[in-house]
Amino acid sequence: MPQINVVVVGGGFAGVSAAKLLSKKLKKNNRVEITLIDRHPYHTYMTELHEVAGGRVEPDAIQYDLQRLFSRRKNVQLVTDNVIELNHDDKTVVTENGQYKYDYLVLGMGGEANDFGTPGVKENGFTLWSWEDAVRIRRHIEDTVALAARERDLEKRAAMLRFVVCGSGLTGIEMIGELVDWKPVLAEKYHIDASEIELIVVEALPEILSTIPKVSSSKVEKYLRKKKVRILTEAPVVNVTAHSVELKTEEVLATHTLIWAAGVKANSDIEDFGTEKARAGRLVANEYMEAKDLEDVYVIGDLVYYEENGKPTPQIVQAAEQTGHTAAKNIVAKIEGGEKHPHESNYQGTLVSVGSTYGVAYLFDKIHLSGFLAILMKHIVNLKYFFDIRSGYYMTQYIFHEFFHIKHKRNIFRGHLSRYGNVLWSVPLRVFYGSMWLVEGLKKAFGILGSESWFKDQVLLPFSWLQNPTSGASEAVEEVAKPIFGLSYAYGEQPMMILDHAPGWFESIMKILIPNTEMALFFQKFMTCVEIAIALALIFGLFTWLTSAATIGLVLSFTLSGMFYWVNIWFIFVAIALMNGSGRAFGLDYYVIPWIQKKAGTIWYGKSTSIHT
């Protein structure tokens, strides 16, 4: 039977969601090949562009390699190229470097900034609609502040340190929020007074954040004004020059930086794609995401114009993913047979971050959150996205970028989780902790320092079914002092066990694992070897995270066996402390872990490339 070609154009939220679902639903159909075409070899996490532009995270934090996202999807071919033409008669996608036949075509190239024809915006403004835009803004702000710090002319200096954001929608407010956070960092770095940096939001409408309830937008406005942000409403921009922004109110703002976040339109690359367009150049589609007047062509994401309840689908991430899923389901229905799936939107709410520590959220049409809870919810939603696209790798990377690798206290926990600490000082603790386990292991192995050897033919585990009735375990023992609770040993006191006998459920498990004397003797020897191996690994800093976690497991096992004292509970907390990369300072992890990560990544994801063909 002939091969079925599904071509998805665009590696944004909509395109990735559609391609992922198609790959999953059609993985058993050997006739289907899915081709994902994008001009970049990576997927950009668009909702976090402001974090790069505002200097919070490094540029690569929002760049997700498509090869890593689709490495285990054998029915997906990745292509890095620009689409220049669609031949609907021949069902061919023409790129700058090739041609791709399609039986089903999904268009998801997204949108771009809409300047509404305002003079000077293209030439002198900065848009925020791509990874390149974010990096350009970041570098411009850094360079401008650095130059301003050396500028003696007060008027020129003030203009250079005045930053204007046009548009108070989600993008504009999130961008100004990042600048609020970045302002003191830049001031300290370039040795200027933070009060010299002026931040301004200009908006054509009477209020900011008009798409969310007033109760939330008012909180944002109050927060920004508290942070000395100047908010100008009913003040459309009418002209932009290299050193000024002219408003309809006749006010002229002297500035070298205008960040344009006033609107979005469909990607201009689709102007000649041969289908009906609606407002802002978006392509008209029906409830199945099928392009109007085109056979087997689907439109998704910011590109699609589909009215639901009298309103067009919003150009937000939730809509992008859901329209992508709708298109994918209907393509699967056509290939495999089945009923079409009309689009049903399900928007859980809106989340707006105003910097790293403040935000607002409006969820399920009734829940209003602000501050810490709103930002926490945004992080949860972002993590859910990686779960939805089945990318554990980038979920982990997100956690590191947002929580552990953050600088200048710019996250929800105000830097308390940052890993930018010197692990050198944990080396003595690591060596001591490993030596302690080594001594305990050697005592069990050789029966030294007053201990019984675990390598003899005597069961020392305290489980009743393993005890010999004639052994010393059943003989009368001398009366000992009453155990006293304490977290450190006190002279003359008998330390208290955490548990003086194993719980019933734990004994049941151990009876299965260690049913007889022979297994118990083997287990004693095995555990002794494990202790010595863990000790050496800690001393030499090899696999420190895993070995520290293993010591926690051992402590829990000893505790449940009725063999562990309260005075030694510090074992657990030392192990947790050593899990923070302690093996990378004068340890083998400095060499071994990066090597394993590189090799494992190559085996699992393949070798990264800048061009997919």
Image (cartoon, helix red, strand yellow):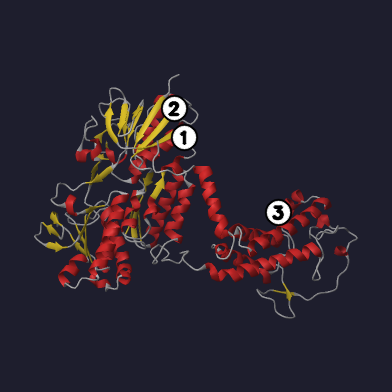
Q: Residues within 10 Å of mark 3 (few under 14, many from 20)?
A: few
Say left or right for 583 vs 125.
Answer: right
Quadrant where the N terminus is found in the figure: top left
Residue 297 x/y as whole percent = 31, 29
Residue sitting at 67 percent across and 74 percent down? Answer: 486
Using the rendered view, name the quadrant where residue 61 is placed.
bottom left
459 to the left or right of 357: right
Pointer 1 local density, CA inside 10 Å: few below 14, some 14–19, many at least 20: few
* Picture quadrant of residue 96: top left
User: Dividing the image into 4 quarters, which one contains the C terminus?
Assistant: top left
Q: Secondary structure at mark 1?
A: helix
* Residue 434 on image: x %, y %: 66, 66
Residue situated in front as seen by the camera: 380 or 192: 192
Residue name at image x 25 percent, y 70 percent: 149
Q: Amino acid at mark 1?
A: Lys
The tag earlier along the polypeptide, 2 or 1, is 1
**Which residue is denoted by mark 2 in the rendering?**
32
- The quarter of the displayed image where residue 444 is located: bottom right
Q: Which residue is mark 1?
A: 24
